[in-house]
Image (cartoon, helix red, strand yellow):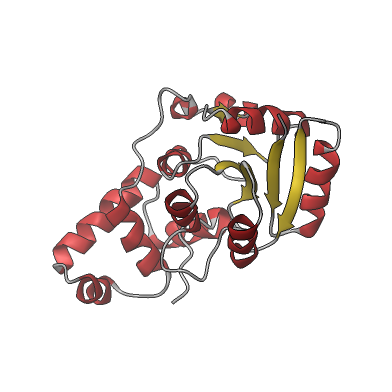
């Protein structure tokens, strides 16, 4: 059986590297490449595939809903391998809660790519060595940190888009205190103590990008 793969990355040279790495595996076929969220959705919609290999920046979307949640909802049979450059246990856990069970760190050897694809295709979990060796034990597959809730993600995305807590409260028809509590709890899970740190983390991860 051949596993059909779509590779996506915000840097075209990376997709070329993925194509080269996968060319050594006869049971894996690269059926398309993408470099942004629109291209990903177009490919997944029109090209039969089993596994999407992508980075967090390629999934930054001009959509109100996170791209991974859209894919999980519309194309539940498509598995995801995410390669990241962050080491935050809550972000990793949140990715897992969005249906991403195979996560690679970009510092790890390319030899981990194929095993991650096989694991994702089998609906199994795969974490590359950098994540497993992290000083945060929560990276272990059976000890993930508590993920952000859907509401916490929504509040952070709106805040990082430039809205104030009061504006978010009005937009979501929630009390200001409720929105503030969601933001505070989410920041605590992420291990950040200031808005500046939150913006910095979002720049590194791209997980909470929001374009209205």
Q: Which residue is pictured at 62% across the width and 46% down the height?
A: 52
User: Which of the 4 image quarters holds residue 42?
Assistant: bottom right
| 86 sits to left or right of 90 | right
Give x and y (percent) for residue 130: 62, 30
Give x and y (percent) for residue 173: 17, 71
| 25 sits to left or right of 81 | right
Decide if residue 189 is in sight here: yes
Give x and y (percent) for residue 135: 52, 27
**Residue 211, relative to residue 3: is it above or below?**
below
**Residue 163, relative to residue 92: is it above or below?**
below
| 88 sits to left or right of 108 | left
Q: Which residue is pictured at 82% across the width and 55% down the height?
A: 13
Exactly how many numbered labels are in the figure?
0
User: Which of the 4 image quarters holds residue 144?
Assistant: top left
State which quarter of the image contains the N terminus. top right
Q: Which residue is pictured at 36% across the width and 41% down the height?
A: 147
| 141 sits to left or right of 45 | left
State which quarter of the image contains the C terminus. bottom left
């Amino acid at each position: 059986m051949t596993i059909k793969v779509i590779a996506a990355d915000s840097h075209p040279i990376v997709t070329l590297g993925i194509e080269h790495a996968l060319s050594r595996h006869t049971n894996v076929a690269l059926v398309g490449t993408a470099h942004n969220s629109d291209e990903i959705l177009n490919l997944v919609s029109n090209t039969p595939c089993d596994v999407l290999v992508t980075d967090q920046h390629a999934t930054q979307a001009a959509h109100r809903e996170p791209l991974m949640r859209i894919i999980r909802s519309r194309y539940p049979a498509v598995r995801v391998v995410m390669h990241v450059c962050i080491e935050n246990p809550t972000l990793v856990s949140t990715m897992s809660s969005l249906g991403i069970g195979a996560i690679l760190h970009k510092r790890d050897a390319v030899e981990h790519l194929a095993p991650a694809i096989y694991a994702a295709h089998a609906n199994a979990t795969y974490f590359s060595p950098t994540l497993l060796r992290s000083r945060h034990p929560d990276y272990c597959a059976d000890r993930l940190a508590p993920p952000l809730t859907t509401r916490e993600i929504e509040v952070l995305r709106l805040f990082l888009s430039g809205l104030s807590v009061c504006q978010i409260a009005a937009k979501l028809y929630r009390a200001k205190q409720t929105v503030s509590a969601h933001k505070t709890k989410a920041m605590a899970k992420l291990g950040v103590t200031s808005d500046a740190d939150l913006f910095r983390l979002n720049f590194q991860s791209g997980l909470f990008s929001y374009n209205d």
